[in-house]
Amino acid sequence: MLGEIGINTFWDFLNYFPRKYIDRSTIKSIGALVEGEDTTIVGEILDTKAEGLSWKKSRFVVYVSDYSGHVLKLIWFYGTAYLKEKFKIGDIIAAHGKVTMFGYEPTMTHPEIDVIKTRDRESENNQNELATVSASDYDLFNAGGIVGFYSTSEKMKQIGLTSKSIRYLMKRLLDEVEKEIPNIFSLEIQAQENLISFAEAYRLIHFPLSQQTLIDAKRTLKWTELFLLQFMFALRYRNQKKKESMFKFVCKQGNDSFEDKLKSVIPYKLTQAQQRAVSEINENMGAGTPMNRLLQGDVGSGKTIVAIHAMMRAVDNGTQCVLMAPTEILATQHFIVIKKLLDQYDLKSALVVGKQTKKLKQEIITGIENGSTQIVVGTHAVLESNVLFHKLGLVIIDEQHRFGVLQRKALQDKALSPHLLIMTATPIPRTLSMTLYGDLDVSVLNEYPTNRKKVITKVLFESERNKVYENIRQEVAKGRQVYVVYPLVEESEKIDLAAAVQEYERLKVEVFPEFTLGLIHVCTTVIEVGIDIPNASIIVIEHAERFGISQLHQLRGRVGRGEEQSYAYLIYCGHISVESKERLNAIESTIDGFKLAEIDFKLRGAGNILGTEQAGRVDALKIANLYEDRELLESARDAAFRLSKEDPQLRTEQNRELRKMYIKFFGRMSELINVG
Ligand code: ADP
Ligand code: MG
């Protein structure tokens, strides 16, 4: 029966944790409520009412009473239809919220509600029994002071499972299996990390004895979950480091060295962060094992030149390298940068993109295959099976989050364990990065090139648009360039496109007849991923409310790349939601991509800020929360990496149960099986 709802083993059931808890010790009698306090009451619904005539003023009111005989009024200003269905006279509910006194009449507005007991709507017999709240209703709060509430899906309800019956079954199950729940961590780790026993943790998360025991139980289970995940990363990391690489790059100096040539032609000095990244990369590529490194750096932090350094070292060591970018514009741009820097020397590079003539492509492919072409830059077109390398030593993927796992792997598979550098401009909070890229080495460019000025950002209402046009005129007069961006949402692509074209015409004819304007149809996505035009000093984003935080940040990153002061104008239209406003304000308040990523994370959660593929890994976490549990994650990761050194196969007696749990957790996929 439980199989229908995905519960197959007793572990599945034990891992069905309460959604929330009510602390009985904080429940107050309605008669004793006072103005302004935040509290919980438990009572019976006496009456429900939809009040008010016009939709604007309508509200839904529930009257609740408890054994004190006093009545509490609960008020909602929306959701009447839904609430009407949800609350029935005779139901026992817990209401949590802030108390306001109107004379002697206590009220709560928009309280949180838990339905504790629904009146048996079929059986009339019950009516008497429920006419008043009896002492036995309060016995629902058995097992100590804090009671867990379980969410119940429609399916669960169909098979008769309520929060209460889950609690009952859970208690019986625990009584039976508690003794069989092993301690999976050695006593040493338990002591070091302040963990309680595993059996106790399961007992207490379902039936806490006090707030402190609940905290302890949660902490132990969260830590365990994070540990298991990080242990997998630790093993993968170890396995990577054990592989041998055919390419052990050394530093070549002198007249023939492209690395030296590059250094002599770069028109600026690398930032310290860039220098650090370059030397971390070089260390990896010289170690005799394949590099697996993520280069994380906010828009404009200068990742490209770091990548070019790595490429020169590869070339100096007699191998080829490939740089794959997600769009043709971006690939072309990288290609031009490399050419511009090094064309005066004898470096052979090639661009591989979709739209090339057969003849040209054949020529390029031949050069790559016979090894005369040293550097290949391209879109996913480089993945095609007819692109074969002579001796590929380094694979670089730009804006890697735009590619799928399989595409990344396909490129790596073009050679036997080449060095791999993946780059991303999507700043993600450190906890997320540890969960997503836990098996990679990471370099972070946490510093901008120094000649940058902060982009001045303004959020404006559409009626203020004229101010923007003025500034545009001034900047263009100085010889600068300007982007104007419109959103394009797939579902209404045609309408959006038409609107963009119309606006383009308006700007061209009415507003700026004196300037040259260009229209790129797919401009949002193109501009977003890394176009580098240092001369551009203004970006105007129309309908800014329709973009997400990271998109806005990426778009803004298109300006402020030169030495001039740049401006970003976020124009919103019509009435926008509180969340949209919060988003725009965040962008206005900081240009720090990592700070913005944290805000985004907080506003929308991990699942929404990552692609689905990546989100899957985060969603797999049942109890740990990457935002709240950052510190636990750090300590679990440290412990996992430590243990992976001491006992990688978990073969010692004290790690026996951990080994079993690990395999249960990851199944056949577990890296333990692969550890030689
Ligand atoms: P991103 O990290 O977003 O890919 P880019 O590599 O496109 O950034 O670099 C952005 C701009 O900054 C480019 O015009 C590049 O030439 C310039 N740049 C990179 N590093 C430095 C530096 N150390 N000093 C000055 N300008 C730099
Ligand atoms: Mg870039």
Image (cartoon, rainbow, N blue to C red):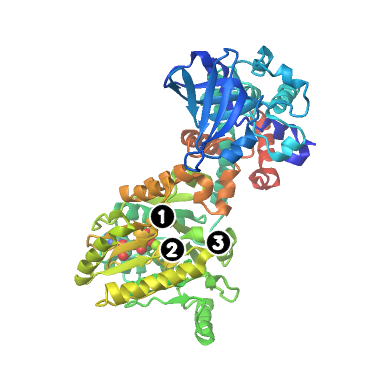
User: Element at badge 2?
Assistant: loop
* CA distance separating discs 2 and 3: 29 Å
Q: Position of residue 460 (x, y in %)?
A: 31, 55
In the shown orientation, is residue 188 left or right of residue 335?
A: right
Residue placed under numbered mark 2 in the picture: 487
Residue placed under numbered mark 3 in the picture: 408
Q: In the image shown, does 309 or 454 lie closer to the viewer? A: 454
Seen as rendered, the residue at the extreme bottom is: 359
User: Element at badge 1?
Assistant: helix
Q: In which quarter of the image is the N terminus?
A: top right
Q: Where is residue 637 in the image (x, y as percent from the top left)?
A: 51, 38
CA neighbours of label 1 inside 10 A, class few (<14), some (14 to 19), many (20+): many
Seen as rendered, the residue at the extreme front is: 53
Mark 1 touches mark 2? (CB < 8 Å): no
* CA distance separating discs 1 and 2: 10 Å
**What amino acid is at disc 3?**
Arg
Q: In which quarter of the image is ligand 1?
A: bottom left
* CA distance separating discs 3 and 1: 33 Å
What residue is at 64 percent from the left and 31 percent from the top?
655
Seen as rendered, the residue at the extreme right is: 1
Q: Residue 545 carries which label?
A: 1
**What amino acid is at disc 2?**
Pro
The response on whether ligand 1 sits within 8 Å of label 2 is no
Mark 2 touches mark 3? (CB < 8 Å): no
- Judge whether residue 49 can be spotted in this image: yes
CA neighbours of label 3 inside 10 A, class few (<14), some (14 to 19), many (20+): many
In the shown orientation, is residue 325 left or right of residue 15?
A: left
Q: In the image shown, does 360 or 510 lie closer to the viewer? A: 510
- Judge whether residue 321 can be spotted in this image: no
The quadrant where residue 9 appears: top right
CA neighbours of label 2 inside 10 A, class few (<14), some (14 to 19), many (20+): many
The quadrant where residue 464 appears: bottom left
